[in-house]
Amino acid sequence: MADLFDYSTPRRTIYGLNSVGKLKDELGNLNKNILYITYKNNGQYMPFHLKILDILKSTSNKIFVFDEVEPEPSIQNVDKAAKYARKNNIEIIVAVGGGSVIDLGKAVSILLTNPGSIREYQMGEKELKNKGIDIIAIPSTAGTGAEATKVAVITNKEEKIKKSILHPYLVPYLVILDPNLTRTLPPKLTSLTGIDALSHSIEAYTSSLEIPFAKATALKSIELIGNNLVKCYRNPDNLDARMGMLIASYLGGMSLIASVGAAHRLAQPISSETGLSHSEAVSVVLINVMKINREYCKEKFRDIASALGIDICKMDLDSASKAAINKVEEIYKNLEIKSSFSNYNVSADKFFSIIKNVNRTTSHLIYNPRPLNDEILQNILEMSK
């Protein structure tokens, strides 16, 4: 008999070229107080932001904008946005951006129906008693999968840690995936967010937590990334590839019900300790995590190799499992990914603090295929120097 799982997904998903235009049909003439959450790029909005704002203004004359989202949103950042939203009696949130924007939007949505600071729900683990207001998530990057998850990652500056809040109330009610929004993403962000999506799917697929929904979405995500990520990097205007990556990222987010492994167990403390972005932190350790895990899940690595387009028919299990790692290394090379701490001027003297913070932030991540301890995590960091 299978264990009991709660598989929470967005109520509706719309995807395709120019799908943001559907916002008008979705909102109609509700004339509700809408909060548009995003960030400015060098002090300016990207053209698609102006288009979406015009659509929103056609549905309501009560549009409010919060565009001060931090790259890794802090408790203070979330609380400031929530205060602004409460002041203006916000009824619907539209979050347009990367994972940081969507995570902040999800956190604000629950603070509008639950009292207090996000700190109480992150650090004090205060119970969320009420469902948040409706949030529409529209990603402009293809990596975090935040639009598909029940998780919001918040930075605690005082404690120097990043910690997740996890609850079904955090799942957006509507997701729109429009490749036009990722078209202007710089090559570096295209590559790094793509590797983040790949890491989600590889770790969910190899997780020891066997959930069929997660394994299926993870493997399809891996296939789509193998087919599309390098194409996006080399030709930013390839909208078919951009669409493939948005779907891959979304499916990768859905697969996270099976949890993630050592790469993510390390990434949060790496990010909070060194200032690297989440995707940079993941990209530094992912390949070495695969290397330390391979012996514990060779069959799954063989499946990953096949999903990445490797012809494994004439390979034995050991060779096929190694081929998965070789293929990811090839993708890194094609994307010109920096794959070591030295590339980011992070010295080994940070490793002690990183390991120390693992148990304060990500000790709940227990489904890595190889059982983890501080020595193994230290070894991964040393391999990634």
Image: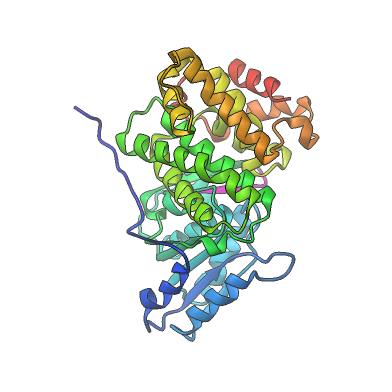
Quadrant housing residue 357: top right
* Location of residue 355 by image quarter: top right
- Camera-side residue: 332 or 159? 332
Q: Is residue 371 above or below residue 166?
A: above
Q: Is residue 81 visible?
A: yes
Quadrant assignment for the N terminus? top left
Residue stretch in magenta: 152-158
The quadrant holding residue 4 is top left
* Residue 31 among magenta residues: no
Residue 135, position as x, y percentages in the image: 43, 64
Foreground pick, 319 / 169: 319
**Residue drawn at x 56%, y 24% as measured from the top left:** 325
Q: Residue at position x 58%, y 24% from top?
A: 326
* Residue 370 visible in image: no
Along the viewing direction, whichever of 87 and 200 lies nearer the viewer: 200
Q: Is residue 147 above or below residue 371?
A: below
x and y percentages locating residue 58 in the rendered image: 47, 85
Residue 286: give x, y in percent of width and height: 59, 30
Q: Residue at x 36, y 34 (%)?
A: 215
Image-based side of 274 in relation to 149, left or right? right
Q: Main secondary structure of the magenta part?
A: strand
Colouring of the image: rainbow
Callout count: 0
Q: Position of residue 237 (x, y in %)?
A: 60, 59
> What quarter of the picture does the C terminus occupy?
top right
Q: Residue at x 37, y 77 (%)?
A: 25
Q: Vertically, is 374 above or below 264?
A: above
Q: Is residue 153 magenta?
A: yes
In the picture, measured across the screen, residue 152 lies left or right of residue 277, that is left
Q: Residue furthest left?
A: 1
- Is residue 111 shown above or below 125? below
